[in-house]
Image: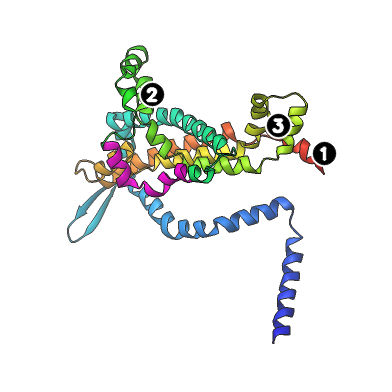
Amino acid sequence: MRKWITSRLQSIKKHVASWGSKFTNAQRESLVGYAFISIWLIGFIGLTAIPLIQSLLYSFHQITIVGGEGIRLFFIGLTNYIRIFSTDLDFLSALQTFAIEMVIFVPVMNILALMIAILLNRKFKFRGFFRAIFFLPVIITSGPVIAELLRQGAGSIPSLTDSGLFDILSSTLPRFLSEPIQSLFSQIIFMLWFSGVQVVLYLAGLQKLDTSMYEAAQIDGANAWESFWKITLPSLRPLILVASIYTIVTLATFANNPLILLISSDMFDPNKGYGYASSMAWIYFAVIALLLWFTTNLIQPKEKGYRVVKEYSRLKR
């Protein structure tokens, strides 16, 4: 019995190997990637895709809930969208503020995370303890905890708010710029709490870099600043893209996001309802998708960004 099982396993292994030899290395890597996300894909198709399509259909209807009959749909086409862009100034103002905040918050959070990762990558005592400290907020800070901390003012630095900096910003910058910058300074601690995953990503990338490249650059006369711009940053470019996308999605889906709270409140407003809120949600989704597209095209790895690393790998072989 044992010999039969062994022979069957070897036969299966040969068939898999022969089947895998038909693919290129890039195709094999793609298959491995799809295997890793297959569980998420199954969950998305089975649990999320249907409500998502249903929400899109709701955005073209006026919805009323009648006792005993359930949900009653009345098709109105693009009326909800036209109404939002023509009359709902609160939503449009919140959407504009969100977009400007993303343009400011995402680079700042990633720069902070990269600086912390570089510091934590150095050799010093209690390095593991400090790494755990920076990742701890990701584990313990849920939506209600963050809401309570922000309500108590724990997300800001009091010396900044009391220094008159906000008054200077309000008097020197236009309102659409001063408000996001003020929000940045007032939530600087909050941003550090949400940088734990980015720190881990950058730290993993820094630990994979070959120190021989830095030694070769140092022999050629490059200083630490030049090595950072020519070796470290190009090598971390894929991780910068992943961290930026993660930051946008995290901030956009945060439970205390003003836009999400506004959509939730309008969903139960008798003058607006589920259909109107669905239209707001899809406009919000379109803005997030546009930000993700812009970020991907701005940061995505280019061939020239890997010139140093590829040349080093070729010479090493």
Label 3 Cα neighbours within 10 Å, binned few <14 / some 14-19 / many ≥20: few
Is residue 266 inside the magenta stretch?
Answer: no
Label 2: which secondary element: helix
Kindly identify the residue that appears in the image at 69 percent across and 55 percent down. 28
Kindly identify the residue that appears in the image at 46 percent across and 59 percent down. 43
- From the viewer's perspective, is 125 left or right of 262? right
Disc nearest the viewer among 3 and 2: 2
Disc nearest the viewer among 1 and 3: 1
Q: Quadrant of the N terminus?
A: bottom right
In the rendered image, residue 109, in percent from the top left (x then y), is placed at 47, 33
Q: Which mark is residue 171?
A: none
Mark 3 vs 2, N-terminal side: 2
Label 3: which secondary element: helix
In the rendered image, residue 283, in percent from the top left (x then y), is placed at 38, 38
Disc nearest the viewer among 2 and 1: 1
In three-dimensional space, the C-alpha distance between marks 3 and 2, rounded to whole angstroms, equals 34 Å
The residue at which mark 1 appears reads as 315
Over which residues does the magenta segment extend? 132-151
Residue 86, by quadrant, is top left
Q: Nearer the viewer, residue 55 or 74?
A: 55
Label 2 Cα neighbours within 10 Å, binned few <14 / some 14-19 / many ≥20: many
In the rendered image, residue 282, in percent from the top left (x then y), is placed at 38, 42
The residue at which mark 3 appears reads as 304
Label 1: which secondary element: helix
The residue at which mark 2 appears reads as 181
